[in-house]
Image (cartoon, rainbow, N blue to C red):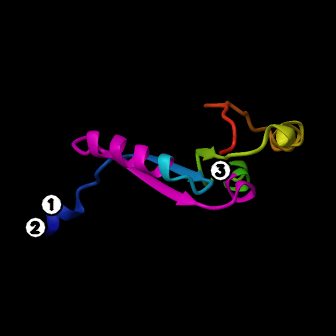
Amino acid sequence: MIKELAKNEIYLKLKIDSYPINMIARNLANFYMKKKDERLHIEFQEGTAEEAIQLVAQQQARIGVIYFAKQQEPVLKRILETKNLQFQALKECELC
C-alpha cells in the first residue's frame, strides 16, 4: 500500500481565480466532473477582480475571470498592459 501511495503521479494542474460568479463555479464543476477519469487537478478560488489580476500577474493562477462595467474597460486594459497580461472577453451583457 505504501508503494502504491508513493508512486509519482503526474497530474495536469490548472489554477483559476474568479470574481464570485455562480455560473463560473457551476460550469467549472460540470467540466471537472466530465474529466474525472483524467489526471486533471483544478484549484478554484474566488476573490475580487484586483485579487484575480494580481494572482495571475504573480503566476499563482493561470486564468483570472472578472466582471466589470464597460466604462471600466480602458482602465482595466491599462492595468493589464502594465502587468503584461492579456484580456479576452468571454461575453458582454447588460446589468440586470
Q: Is residue 25 magenta?
A: yes
Tell me the mark number nearer the camera, choosing from 2 and 3.
3
Say which residue appears at 63% left-offset and 46% top-offset: 64
User: Image check: 10 left or right of 81?
Assistant: left
Nearer to us in this view, 24 or 58: 24
- Neighbour tally class for label 2: few under 14, some 14-19, many 20 plus, Cα within 10 Å: few
On the rendered image, what quadrant is the C terminus found in? top right
Nearer to us in this view, 67 or 57: 67
- What is the x, y in percent for residue 82? 87, 42
User: Which secondary structure, mark 3?
Assistant: loop
- What is the x, y in percent for residue 21? 55, 52
**On the image, numbered disc 3 is attached to which residue?**
59
User: Which secondary structure, mark 2?
Assistant: loop
Q: Earlier in the sequence, mark 3 or mark 1?
A: 1
* Amino acid type at image mark 1: Glu
- Please determine whether, in this image, residue 49 is positioned above or below residue 12: below
Range of magenta residues: 24-52
* Amino acid type at image mark 3: Gln
Nearer to us in this view, 55 or 28: 28
Single out the residue that lies furthest toward the bottom: 2
User: Image check: 66 left or right of 31?
Assistant: right
Q: Which mark is residue 19?
A: none
Q: For marks 2 and 3, give the CA distance.
A: 35 Å
On the rendered image, what quadrant is the N terminus found in? bottom left
**On the image, numbered disc 2 is attached to which residue?**
1
Q: For marks 1 and 2, give the CA distance.
A: 5 Å
